[in-house]
Amino acid sequence: GRVRIGFMSSTWNSNGVGMYMKDWRLWRLCGSHGRIECYALSTGETDLEEAPLLEMAEGMGADHILDLRDTSAQMAESLIKGAGIDILLDINGYTEGQRPGPPPRARPR
């Protein structure tokens, strides 16, 4: 089966991390490699209608976008599990809008 990779960020605007996202080798595999399925997960205050990086994510082959902004930790865990994400990367670390602490651990299927 395909490996599902989630890229989680509190901001998908043109911030420090976001500006370099398009150059990440792993991200560039999204949409170009049949064995990888990519998810963009939004946890912050980004207006998803005006998020240039989410548009870029779709243009670069992100298969799915999950909006976790107004969800509880338990609901976020449920959505991540439901998507079957195998690898979850927090691409912005501890910064404004980021949820303190890791999301609840998604147990192996």
Image: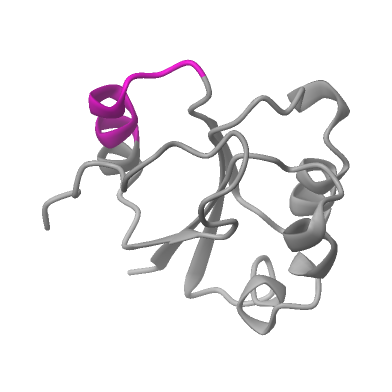
Q: Residue 74 versus residue 102: which sits nearer the camera?
A: 102
Write the start and end of the magenta stretch as one range.
70-79
Horizontal side of residue 108 vs 34, given as left or right: left
Q: Is residue 78 magenta?
A: yes
* Quadrant for the C terminus in the image: bottom left
At a point 68% along the width and 83% down the height, the residue shown is 25
Q: Is residue 49 magenta?
A: no
Q: Compared to 85, does 48 lie above or below?
A: above
Query: In this figure, which colouring scheme has been used for the structure?
Result: one colour
Horizontal side of residue 96 vs 71, given as left or right: right
The dominant secondary structure in magenta is helix
Residue 26 visible in this rendered orientation of the protein: yes
Q: Position of residue 90 (x, y in %)?
A: 48, 57
Q: Residue 8 versus residue 82: which sits nearer the camera?
A: 8
Q: Position of residue 88 (x, y in %)?
A: 40, 59
Q: Compared to 11, does 36 lie above or below?
A: below
Q: Position of residue 105 (x, y in %)?
A: 19, 49
At a point 59% along the width and 56% down the height, the residue shown is 92
Query: Outermost residue, bottom direction?
Result: 25
At a point 12% along the width and 58% down the height, the residue shown is 108
